[in-house]
Amino acid sequence: MAEIIDTAAEPDRALSRGVEVLSSGRPVAIPTETVYGLAADATRAEAVLSIYETKGRPRFNPLIAHVGDMAMAERHAVFDPISRRLAERFWPGPLTLVLPLRRDPGDGVAIDPLASAGLDTIGLRMPDGFARRLISAFGRPLAAPSANTSGRISPTMATHVAEDLGEKIALILDGGPCPVGVESTIVKVDGKTLTLLRPGGLDAAEIERVSGHALTRLETPGATILAPGMLASHYAPDALVRLDVTQVRPGEALIRFGSAPVPGEEQAAIVIELSRTGDLRTAAARLFSALKEADRQAHAGIAVTPIPGDGLGEAIRDRLMRAAAPRG
Ligand code: TXA
Ligand code: MG
């Protein structure tokens, strides 16, 4: 079983053990403001490989490289005025920028092509808090997807990681519940074209406001027909998920947003509140825990009441649609 260290109670030991395990080329589960990450040295192929092995990820998707400061970021990617403004405004925070990759970082060691999946771009993010301190102490970028078995719901608490990957990894750094609760917003910056690759914990409207550019969206928000390959078995609980439910069926686990009563809710196996006041930040922070709890309690699937698609609602609806998508 993985060693678990509380980053608030023992920050120095958490940092030194983290650096030690990362230096040995093994992955470490780390808290970030979005979700827990399975982090490894982004500059070493065998370390990046161990992430894929641990997650059971079938294919080599590009991973996000997490950086500790702007100097580290600029060693590995080319910033233009728009991407620099976004980084200055939103880092550290739940924003990933996909930028041109620098293969020759000058005085540093290059990001391994396995982390960038051989692309000529790199997804960079500067996380907040303990994760950032760990990267700075380690001195190199950390590749980190969410710390869950491939296709499962992302972990927002150390116990989620321990239950899923505890037998496979050496160290889990416990920073408490993740305050944002959904993964980072991913934006590709290509000249003046900004493409929203994934809605996430930073409201897309904020990015449009600060950059002065409208985001190109790959998918229509709220669309029901999305690329099936992208959706199948992503964020999948075991129970089937119904969205925008206005009538609960007996034995369903009900996930409710807002305070309005839902017809049939007295027959639900359990009622889980995302936010009674209809606050999207609270709902995002609780989303993945709610799905896991609903999955444990449901006798007849999971029912979710309507959630608006504006602001953080875009990311919440995106994750729920993936959870509800036909299984591959
Ligand atoms: O909040 C987060 O972003 C979390 C925490 C741990 O930081 N990480 C995360 O990583 O969600 P992951 O691996 O689950 O999602 C990374 C996604 C990839 O699936 C890919 O779609 C996109 O980022 N990505 C990364 N680099 C890219 C690139 N060069 N071009 C296009 N997409 C890229
Ligand atoms: Mg993931």
Image (cartoon, rainbow, N blue to C red):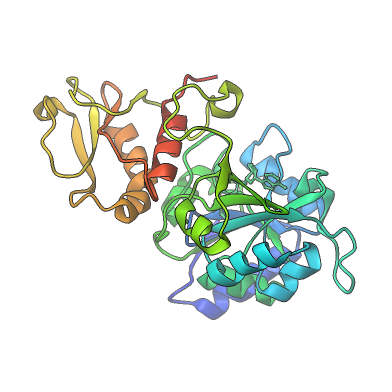
Q: Total of numbered circles in the picture?
A: 0
Locate residue 112: give its quadrant. Answer: bottom right
Above or below: residue 125 compared with residue 313: below
Residue at 80%, 59% in the rendered image: 43
For image coordinates 44% across by 75% down, the residue present is 8
Q: Along the line of sight, which residue is nearer the eye, 315 or 153?
A: 315
Image coordinates for residue 311, horizontal then vertical, percent: 39, 50
Q: Position of residue 239 (x, y in %)?
A: 36, 25
Q: Is residue 92 left or right of residue 140?
A: left
Can you name the residue that lies furthest to the bottom here? 12
Judge left or right: residue 243 versus residue 259: right
Choose top left, top right, bottom left or bottom right for residue 77: bottom right
**Is 80 displayed left or right of 39 in the figure?**
right
Viewer-proximal residue among 245 and 172: 245
Residue 88 percent coordinates (x, y)? 60, 72
Q: Camera-side residue: 199 or 206?
A: 206
